[in-house]
């Protein structure tokens, strides 16, 4: 029996990214061939999924993610997403995706105006590929956050749309909201469902020795989907049934 193929996952590194290495290691441990891609590249190498990691791209000048959205690689990320490729934005990556218009809403300074760094409990609102297929709706996850501008905001009409189309994927559990995010929103996806941004850091919760392995459910779901995508694109051997 042949081993399961290892899908390629590109982790985009910007000036000021500091969790790209952790994301690469976490994805490798979950069965991916993960590799870093510098933000100045005009094209993505062949990949089955893309991750925009946490950090402080361009020092968070202007607004978090406001400069990174203009990086050359973002045109390729946008094209990849338009073709249905899965894109995951973690913390600063979430901010970049919102600034780039790939996700709805904005990330504002935390309500306390203080940086927060701690484990938080989350509730899975939507359990589906490509990001939460290893989870169950209503499941409780514990994943750390570390940010100063993680307060998700959307006006009431947009919030109604997000709810109507099942775009709120993760919420902070009651009493766990660390930043004042509207409706306790911790993670949202686009209408097509293939782009997700979340403020918690799943790459820092992939080993129970670190306090929680719940982040592996999110990243593992992404790896599963990327592997399925790789297999679907592979040439069929002669005589194989469709």
Image (tube, grey):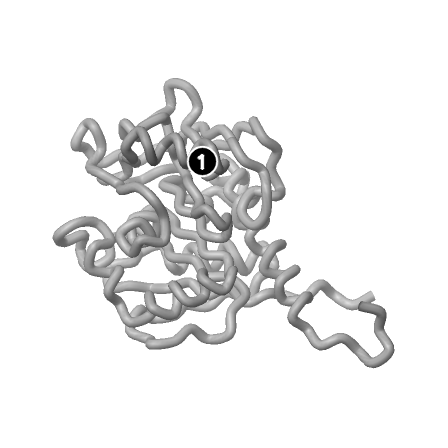
- Could you say which quadrant of the image residue 208 lies in? top right
Q: Position of residue 82 (x, y in %)?
A: 45, 62
Residue furthest to the top: 175
Q: Is residue 49 above or below residue 56?
A: below
Residue 190 located left or right of residue 101? right
Residue 67 position in % (x across, y down): 20, 59
> Residue at 51% across / 61% down in the picture?
85
Q: Quadrant of the C terminus?
A: bottom right
Rendering quarter of residue 38: bottom left
Q: Nearer the viewer, residue 100 or 44?
A: 100
Q: Quadrant of the image for the N terminus?
A: bottom right
Residue hosting label 1: 168
Of all residues, the one furthest to the left in this rendering is 62
Q: Residue at 31% of width from left, 40% of height from top?
A: 146
Helix, strand or loop for disc 1: strand
- Foreground pick, 70 / 2: 70
On the picture, is 233 further left or further right than 149? Answer: right
Residue 182 coordinates in the image, percent (x, y): 31, 28
Q: Nearer the viewer, residue 34 or 123?
A: 123
131 shown above or below 125: below
> Callout 1: 10 Å neighbours few (<14), some, many (20+)?
many
Q: Tell me, yes or no, if residue 144 can be seen here.
A: yes
| Residue 100 found in image quarter | bottom left
């Amino acid at each position: 029996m042949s081993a399961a193929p290892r899908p390629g996952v590109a982790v985009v590194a910007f000036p000021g990214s500091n969790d790209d290495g952790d994301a690469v290691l976490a994805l490798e441990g979950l069965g991916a061939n993960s590799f870093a891609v510098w933000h100045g590249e005009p094209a993505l190498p062949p990949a089955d999924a893309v991750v925009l990691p946490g950090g402080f791209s361009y020092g968070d000048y202007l607004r978090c993610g406001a400069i990174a959205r203009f990086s050359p690689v973002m045109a390729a990320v946008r094209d990849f997403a338009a073709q249905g490729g899965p894109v995951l934005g973690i913390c600063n990556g979430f901010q970049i995706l919102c600034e780039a218009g790939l996700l709805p809403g904005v990330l504002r300074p935390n309500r306390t105006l203080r940086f927060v760094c701690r484990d938080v409990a989350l509730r899975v609102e939507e359990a589906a590929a490509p990001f939460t297929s290893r989870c169950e709706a209503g499941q409780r996850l514990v994943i750390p956050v570390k940010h100063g501008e993680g307060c998700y905001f959307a006006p009431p009409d947009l919030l109604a749309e997000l709810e109507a189309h099942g775009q709120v994927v993760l919420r902070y559990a009651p009493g766990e909201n660390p930043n004042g995010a509207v409706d306790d929103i911790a993670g949202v996806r686009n209408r097509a469902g293939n782009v997700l941004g979340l403020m918690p850091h799943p790459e820092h919760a992939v080993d129970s020795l670190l306090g929680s392995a719940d982040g592996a459910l999110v990243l593992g779901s992404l790896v599963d989907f990327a592997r399925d995508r790789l297999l679907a694109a592979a040439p069929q051997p002669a005589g194989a049934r469709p």
